[in-house]
Amino acid sequence: MATKHHVVLPGEPIDPSLIPTHPKHPLRLGPGLRHIPPEDIVPTVAGQLITNPAKNSMWIEYNSNRYIPSQNDLVLAQILRSTSDFYLCSLSPHTAPATLPHLAFEAATKKTRPQLAPGQLVYARVSLANKHMDPELECVHPGTGKADGLGPIAGPGCAFDVSLGFARRLLMARSREEGGVGVLEMLGGEEGGGLAFETAVGRNGRVWVGSESPKTVVIVGRALQETDRLGLGLEGQRKLVKRLVKEVK
Amino acid sequence: MTVSSAPEVAFGVLPRADGSARYSHAGYTVLASVNGPIEAQRRDEHAYEAHVDVIVRPAAGVGGTRERHLEAILQSSLSQLILIKNFPRCLIQIVLQVESSPENDYVNTKLVQASLNFALMPTLMQTAILALLSAGVPMRATATATAIAVSHDKTVVDPSPRDVETARSVHVLAFTSQDDLLLAESEGDFTVKEWDDIYEAAKKICCRPAPDGASMQLDDDDSSPAAVGPDLRQFLRSTMESKVAADLHWK
């Protein structure tokens, strides 16, 4: 994966030797970098410069508390109110509301659209993120018309706030091996005594934990938040899970 | 008499804010919180750029005209640094709370209305920059600022309240990390020659090149470290390095 690690500050020149070159692929700039034509590449945030020579891409890793929507992110949104054609949802506090069209649900027509009350949580994908417009969400795959696990969240549960970086790790396909986060697997496995729960992780730093038993929701939510806050490794997560299960029971 | 302490900073002091920093230097301690980009009120909304809102709160009492003046100065310089075109119709809110200021041994201040002056400006500026970095707000460059007081052909860097009182003129200068002049505010009587000298002195403090063997020795020969003040740019860099390392645990 990534090879080099350099801390950069906004506006600092990047050493040309760090910029990857590739005979075929064009150079791709990720978050935190700005191209000033003709040839300057300048960081805009303080963070770690990561380059990937194989894909000819570079970006800056940094941690911020404010979620800025980008296309195809999976987010946990909360319905604020409904208008004639769409729901207005909140992704993070005090930001402009995102729009979720009434017809952007699986098998929704004008007659059979889901009726969502203010406060309802929705697991959705960001379908449009443009700096001049409010973000748009959808709960249906535009190609297949299937929900693919998106949609209104039903059943007993609770949403917890975590940091954006931790939410991203939870969303990794192999979060235990690559991300170092095995806390959910442990809670459902032998360390947690096989707790039964389901989760929906939003890239906007919110995790919904659902279970029939309120105890399980509390254990899972606290385990996630403490792992995030203390930055625990796999061994620390195992100890935490064992402790929480013992304490709450 | 001079209150020259090494600068200190703590990040993330306010857990609910998007970014925060507590910075203390030259006897002043300022706490800053940054929230943004958030939704702007209709009257502050610009169609093509973000509105930067700076609020300065004094150590005691409520802010008055002096604070509004400082806010206006800071607002215009910070808008130059922040990439406001990236967030149209948004608001970036910076709140600066003065927590403590150095005492003046000559005047019995009861601290009913904390007096504000230019000596506070560099600390406010530096705290705002650090909090913006902590919030991850995209910026064109970083900046470093310093205050210089001139009294009877003696120049004092980071002056104490007494120095400001006795000084003929007080100047605040800030430079971006590309060595460009960002802010120059002066009060009092001074000549063009004096201002040029102050400009050179401030540039030396704010834009010190990254330390490597040769330049370090030159610096030591030129002037004593006390007269030059702390290396602000190096300070900014080293503190951000440790912060980034801590932040990226869950990258």
Image (tube, rainbow, N blue to C red):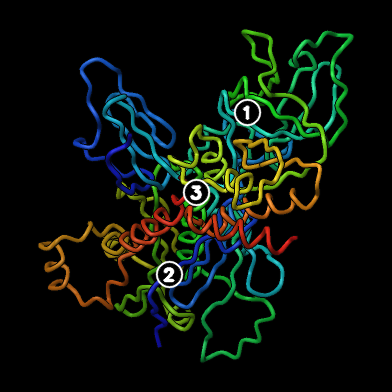
Badge 1 is on which residue? B47
Residue A182 placement (x, y as % from top left): 53, 46
Q: Is residue A89 left or right of residue B237?
A: right
x and y percent of residue B70 in the render?
Answer: 56, 60
Q: Quadrant of the C terminus of chain B?
A: top left
Q: Look at the picture and state if A151 lies above or below B41.
A: above
Q: Quadrant of the N terminus of chain B?
A: bottom left
Where residue A90 is drawn, which disc sits there? none
Q: Which residue is mark 3?
A: B78
The residue singled out by tag 2 in the image is: B170
Comes first in the chain, label 1 or label 3: 1
Please say if the residues under marks 1 and 3 sit with CB atoms less than 8 Å apart: no
The structure residue drawn at horizontal position 67% and vertical position 41%, both measured from the top left corner, is A207
Q: Please tell me if label 2 and label 3 are on a single chain.
A: yes
Residue type at mark 1 is Ala
> Dot 1 surroundings within 10 Å: few (below 14), some, or many (20 or more)?
few
Chain letter of the residue beneath label 2 in the structure image? B
Between the C-alphas of marks 1 and 2, the distance is 38 Å
Tell me which residue sits at (34%, 57%) in the image: B237
Front-lying residue, A143 or A127: A143
Q: Which residue sits at x=57%, y=23%?
A: A72
The reply to whether the C-beta atoms of the residues labelled 2 and 3 are less than 8 Å apart is: no
Kind of residue indicated by mark 2: Val
Which element is circle 2 on?
A: strand
**Among numbered discs 1 and 2, the one appearing first in the sequence:** 1
Amino acid type assigned to the residue bearing label 3 in the image: Leu
**How busy is the neighbourhood of tag 3: few (under 14 within 10 Å), some, or many (20 plus)?**
many
* Earlier sequence position, callout 2 versus callout 3: 3
Q: Quadrant of the rendered structure where residue A109 is?
A: top right
Q: Secondary structure at mark 1?
A: loop
Whole-number angstrom distance, CA of label 2 to CA of label 3: 21 Å
